[in-house]
Amino acid sequence: MPAIQPYIIEPIFQQFLALLPPKSTEHPLGCHRPRIPDRVVFEKLVQVLVFGCAYWRIADETCSATTLRRRRDEWIEAGVMDELEEAAREAYDRVIGLQLADVAVDCCITKAPCGGEKAGKSPVDRGKQGLKRSMMVDGEGIPLGVVAAGANRHDSPLLAPTLDALNSLGGLPDPVSVHLDRGYDSDVTRRLLEERGLSGVISERGKPDPLERFANRVDHVQRCGAWAFTRRISG
């Protein structure tokens, strides 16, 4: 069962292929194992994203889990994934349209059992290694940017680098409302938004949220974060 229909994935792969840097597949001695085709790896990585399964479950005789991780890291280091993300977002904006008048930002904590340079002690998991992901979405829940940090970081300091993703989106509507939960309810946050020409819609501490605000805005970023977690996307 294909993760995405061929008429959709084929043009995406052709655009992705144009982004790949030249890579020699020849070995001086001609005795190495042939390099797994980029198409095979690309389709399996798409399956991981669509189905949310582990690499070892997707791996088979055509491509191992180790190759999937190694090629993924190779493409990330080359900047190919960032370019593909930007191309996908531009295509969505052109065909459907990003809802940038209302954006939402929130953080979530996930486990990081293998550690990593951005991992930190998780305050909700007995001090084990964890990762905090600060994510921004548009008014319909389409991800616009994500920043990863240690699980022991507070949400507020991650707001500025998360909002930086707006700088790459071209012309923005006026005004842009940023929806935040009560963890961001501070004068520091309000000053930050004012300096950037943004309007803040922030839940107040000690007061219940209006139901329509939570359902229409903040819930979008939380659902997007849950989707990213089930598909092992850390940003």
Image (cartoon, helix red, strand yellow):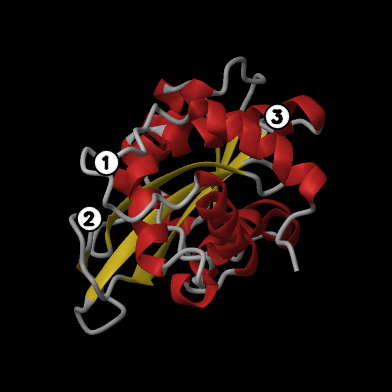
Q: Tell which of 22 and 214 is nearer to you.
A: 22
**Which residue is denoted by mark 1 in the rendering?**
27
SS at circle 2: loop
Mark 1 and mark 3 lie on one chain; the one further toward the N terminus is 1
User: Dot 3, how many residues are within 10 Å of its Cα: few (below 14), some (14-19), or many (20+)?
Assistant: few
Q: Is residue 70 left or right of residue 197?
A: left
Placement of 78 over or under 40, stated as above or below: above
Q: In this view, does 106 lie to the left or right of 133?
A: right
The amino acid on which the numbered mark 1 sits, given as a three-letter code, is His
Residue 98 makes an appearance in the image: no
Q: Nearer the viewer, mark 2 or mark 1?
A: 1
Q: Nearer the viewer, mark 1 or mark 3?
A: 1
For the point 42% across and 59% down, the residue is 68
Residue 198, image x, y percentages: 52, 27
Quadrant in the picture for residue 91: top right
Quadrant in the picture for residue 74: top left
The amino acid on which the numbered mark 2 sits, given as a three-letter code, is Lys
**Which residue is denoted by mark 3 in the rendering?**
91
For the point 19% across and 79% down, the residue is 127
Task: Specify the label residue 118 is tagged with.
Answer: 2
Residue lying farthest top? 171
SS at circle 3: helix
Q: Do the residues labelled 2 and 3 touch (CB within 8 Å)?
A: no
